[in-house]
Image (cartoon, grey):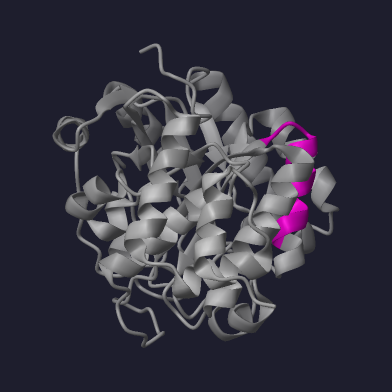
């Protein structure tokens, strides 16, 4: 017999974990007000103080040439396109130098699946960054990139991770998850790492003490059931490894070369799913609001729907910008938004520790 929504609310109020079936009912039938209220109670149970964290770092995309050609992506280019590029190591270092001058503490290094780049490039890049900027945290290579390296260079995933860690890799970004359901992945990213491959990279990384974030991009063809499935698989992996530092949900951005013609996700849908994520992911401490895709106003509201972090000021960001997303901010503006929302801004590190700088 299917549980009623009131029973599910009571279970949440008792601090009990929801199962998959209950999650589906809650997402389908729960009101945004009731879900948001309970998400915020959980947020304050995990983070009793009114602190909202953020980071100063930079997204560096080392190449935009990509053979995977996901339908939702406006960033990738073919190798012969006039605006295709691959950064030299010196060009990457120049961007890091600018980041350090702006008091940045980390870089997020990601790029397209470019078969012309040798594995030695990645190893040399990390080696030089580690040597020249030992204070910078290297958060690099999402699971699909690791899978791509594994297949291209004919190396087991574990060996790829070990070799990259040895030369400077410190943590993995949670990108490339999109929706962890093969039905939707086949529609939006048929050439990308499969669900099991994404999860396998994360599990192996966590066992090597390479921590990571987890993400979800929604607003294409996914069902409510697939959203809960996505969260359920992340929660099960976190039960085993405790390697996820945060969860970041964001919405598909329609624009540029992106080829999925779906309706723009409403702000209420974004807030409901973010709050639902805070409830369902009872073993992940941090939930991040996406000002980049939603704007500062909605990010401010998200801080009352279970989010305790607003991510990076993003000294540089290219992927979402290519899809026509024009939201921008700086540290002063981000701190003001947090204060105006009734919270205390606190700078953090990539691994969600309070920053000393």
**Above or below — where is 330 with respect to 355?**
below
Q: Is residue 10 magenta-colored?
A: no
Q: Residue at x 32, y 84 (%)?
A: 263
Q: Find the residue positioned furthest to the top.
A: 356
Q: In the rendering, at what x and y percent does residue 237 appear?
A: 73, 50
Q: Quadrant of the C terminus?
A: top left
Q: Quadrant of the N terminus?
A: bottom right
Q: Nearer the viewer, residue 40 or 133?
A: 40
Q: Residue at x 41, y 85 (%)?
A: 260
The magenta stretch is 198-210
**Above or below — where is 40 with respect to 166?**
below
Q: Residue at x 62, y 66 (%)?
A: 22
Magenta span: helix, strand or loop, mainly? helix
Q: Nearer the viewer, residue 140 or 307?
A: 307
Q: Is residue 103 left or right of residue 282?
A: left
Q: Nearer the viewer, residue 107 or 97?
A: 107
Q: Is residue 170 left or right of residue 77?
A: right
Q: Residue at x 28, y 39 (%)?
A: 313
Q: In the rendering, at what x and y percent does residue 114 appear?
A: 58, 64
């Amino acid at each position: 017999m299917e549980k009623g929504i009131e029973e599910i609310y009571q279970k949440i109020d008792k601090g009990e974990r929801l199962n998959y079936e209950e999650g589906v009912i809650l997402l389908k039938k729960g009101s945004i007000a009731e879900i948001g209220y309970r998400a915020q109670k959980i947020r304050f149970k995990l983070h009793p103080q009114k602190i909202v964290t953020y980071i100063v770092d930079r997204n560096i995309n080392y190449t935009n040439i990509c053979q995977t050609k996901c339908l939702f992506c406006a960033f990738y280019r073919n190798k012969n396109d006039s605006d295709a590029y691959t950064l030299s190591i010196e060009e990457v270092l120049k961007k890091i130098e600018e980041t350090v001058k702006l008091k940045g503490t980390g870089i997020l290094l990601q790029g397209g699946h470019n078969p012309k780049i040798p594995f030695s490039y990645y190893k040399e890049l990390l080696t030089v960054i580690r040597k020249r900027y030992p204070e910078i945290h290297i958060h690099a290579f999402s699971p699909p990139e690791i899978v791509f390296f594994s297949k291209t260079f004919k190396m087991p995933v574990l060996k790829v991770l070990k070799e990259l860690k040895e030369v400077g890799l410190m943590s993995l970004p949670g990108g490339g998850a999109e929706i962890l359901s093969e039905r939707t992945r086949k529609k939006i990213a048929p050439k990308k790492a499969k669900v099991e491959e994404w999860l396998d990279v994360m599990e192996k990384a966590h066992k090597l003490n390479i921590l990571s974030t987890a993400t979800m991009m929604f607003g294409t063809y996914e069902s409510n059931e697939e959203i809960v499935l996505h969260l359920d698989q992340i929660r099960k992996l976190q039960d085993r490894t405790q390697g996820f530092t945060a969860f970041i949900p964001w919405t598909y951005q329609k624009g540029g070369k992106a080829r999925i013609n779906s309706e723009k996700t409403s702000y209420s849908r974004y807030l409901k799913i973010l709050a639902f994520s805070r409830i369902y992911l009872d073993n992940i401490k941090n939930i991040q609001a996406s000002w980049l895709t939603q704007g500062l106003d909605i990010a401010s509201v998200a801080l009352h729907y279970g989010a305790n972090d607003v991510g990076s000021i993003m000294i540089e960001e290219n992927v979402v910008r290519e899809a026509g997303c024009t939201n921008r901010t700086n540290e002063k503006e981000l701190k003001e938004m947090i204060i105006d929302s009734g919270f205390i801004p606190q700078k953090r590190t990539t691994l969600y520790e309070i920053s000393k700088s």
